[in-house]
Amino acid sequence: MDPLAVVKTLWHHKFFVIPVVLLTLLAAVYVYQFGPRSYEASMSYAVVNPIVPTPEEIEKDPELELLNKDNPYLRSADPALVIDVLITRLNSLATADKLQEAGLGSEYAVSRGVGGNGFVIDIRGVGETEEQAIATASALGKNLESDLKEMQSVNGADERYLFTSLTVSTPDRATELYSNRLRAAIIVFLVGTILVFAAVSLARAIEAAKKNRAVRKSAPSTAGLPADGAVPGGLHLDAIPDSKARPVPGEATATRAGRRRSARTPDEPQETLTPSSEKVGADKGAP
């Protein structure tokens, strides 16, 4: 499509396009300036390995041998398994429902920190206000601590054999997410673009209707007949006899008796026909 042709078309229908463009700009400015805003607060946790009693400590204190050390995550070949399970639990729908029931933001993210490796977990909470965002991140941090202890104590392992969490950073303040407002403004621009093309289509339809109406008004009354005079059935208008046509003087016309006589001119007296019975009676009465 030629961009110059598009511009010419838009300018040709400017009375329809300009109002839509102005409304789109006003809506985009309103959404960006006065639309709903979102704030984000973040915090980080580090998961620390348990301090397992050494053989020397067990030898000095035999009671340590009696502690329950059945932690399923200590038996795993992958030491980062506890991190994966913990992130999965925090990103579950059950956690989101708990936050929503508490009046907090249901939009958040829990992921690995330090480039996606290690035992650091990043938590990001989103809210409509700064306070809600900070409260959401703090609530997720408490859920992390409780879930970490709960999933390791499934077999009743002693606390000395459990992974523990260490707070790296706290959600002191929240920052505004300008991307959300920018995304809303982009959506408004897209809707406005669709409305512009719809306005052009409407303007072209109205213009075509006006042209058709003008053509119908300027057309003659016989515009409905074919240009060559032909009518359905293969006949021609000139071949159709006119029932109201008068006889031409000098031409033969048919009478009611089926006989043909020549048409008289207006100056000649017209002969009247009398019945044969009246004529015979008249002959007899004559002297």
Image (spheres, rainbow, N blue to C red):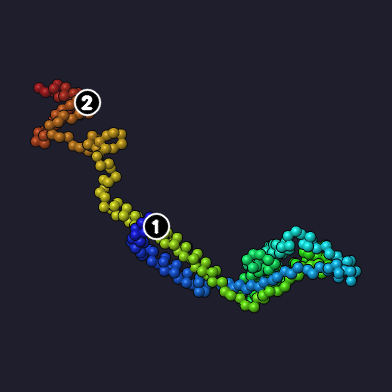
Disc 1, SS: helix
Type of the residue with mark 1: Ser
Q: Quadrant of residue 83?
A: bottom right
Task: State the mark number for residue 177.
Answer: none
Which tag is nearer the camera, tag 1 or tag 2? 1
| Label 2 sits on residue | 258
Marks 1/2: CA–CA distance: 70 Å
Among numbered discs 1 and 2, the one appearing first in the sequence: 1
Instruction: Tell me which residue sits at (45%, 67%) in the image.
Output: 24
Expressed as whole percent of the image width and height from the top left, the position of residue 258 reads 22, 26
Crowd class of label 1 (few under 14; some 14 to 19; many from 20; radius 10 Å): some
Q: Quadrant of residue 90?
A: bottom right
Instruction: Tell me which residue sits at (49%, 66%) in the image.
Output: 186
Expressed as whole percent of the image width and height from the top left, the position of residue 5 reads 34, 58
Please indicate, yes or no, whether residue 281 appears anywhere in the rendered image.
Answer: no
Type of the residue with mark 2: Gly
The answer to whether residue 137 is left or right of residue 6 is right
| Label 1 sits on residue | 201
Instruction: Tell me which residue sits at (9%, 22%) in the image.
Output: 287
**Labels in figure, total:** 2
